[in-house]
Amino acid sequence: MSWSRLGLAGLLALVLAGCGGMNVQDFKGREPRLVIEDYFAGRTLAWGMFHDRFGNLRREFEVTIDGTWDEAKQTLTLVEDFVYADGEEERRVWTIVKTGPDTYTGTADGVVGTAEGEAQGNTLNWRYTFALPVGESVWNVQFDDWLYLQPGGALLNRAVVSKFGLTLGEVSLAFVKPEKLSAAAGNEPMQTAAAE
């Protein structure tokens, strides 16, 4: 093999290695530590949006999440009630099983098969296939979901949605506990369309 071909092969290997994306292990030891069964116990509020791959805002929504942790079964149940800006409402129920100190599996309406998750430090990476209605058809799209716990208690979420390896768009969410909102507003509870 000539030196030029060897150099080209090496460059290609570096480019492909750089396309590997983030690794949840890179967040090991970061604080505050994210333990989802603790964070999502009780009520959590969230606000989110979906941007398509061109950066256009396509949807906005609010979510009220009620979480229950069953210690004996090592199972977290999340009841998510979505209210979209156009008035559409949707409920999704997640059943998440803790399978190890830092690993989880999950099922929910619309999820194809089982979601796989791993937490390290302040971060959770959650990957799954979702059956997304598009017009008269349903597309099986992949979610690469990253959640980052912040020092003030907010949980930031960025999910890349793709099909056949091509990015379709991104979902961004901010999760907050109601008591944190009350404290930020000078003990005046904030109202949301999704809250009861």
Image: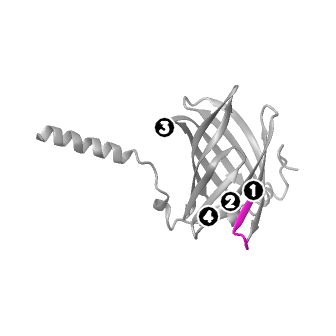
Residue type for callout 2: Ile
Q: Which quadrant of the structure image shows residue 59?
A: top right
For marks 1 and 2, give the one nearer the viewer: 2
Where is residue 14 shown, x and y percent of the image? 30, 46
Where is residue 166 shown, x and y percent of the image? 49, 34
Q: Earlier in the sequence, mark 4 or mark 3?
A: 4
Q: Earlier in the sequence, mark 1 or mark 4?
A: 4
Mark 2: secondary structure = strand
Where is residue 3 shown, x and y percent of the image? 12, 41
Q: Earlier in the sequence, mark 2 or mark 4?
A: 4
Mark 4: secondary structure = loop
The residue singled out by tag 2 in the image is 96
Residue 19 among magenta residues: no
Residue in the picture at 63% in, 42% down? 130
Give how far apart the Cα atoms at labels 1 and 4 are: 16 Å
Label 1, residues with CA under 10 Å away: few <14, some 14-19, many ≥20: many
Q: Is residue 47 above or below residue 176?
A: above
**Which residue is the extreme one toward the right?**
196
For marks 4 and 3, give the one nearer the viewer: 3
Q: Earlier in the sequence, mark 1 or mark 3?
A: 1
For marks 1 and 4, give the one nearer the viewer: 1
Q: What's the mark number on residue 78? A: 1
Q: What's the mark number on residue 165? A: 3
Residue type for callout 1: Leu
Label 4, residues with CA under 10 Å away: few <14, some 14-19, many ≥20: many
Give how far apart the Cα atoms at labels 2 and 4 are: 15 Å
For the record, the magenta segment spans: 71-77
**Which residue is the extreme one toward the top?**
136
**Badge 2 vs badge 4, beta-carbon distance below 8 Å:** no
The residue singled out by tag 4 in the image is 34
Q: Quadrant of the N terminus?
A: top left
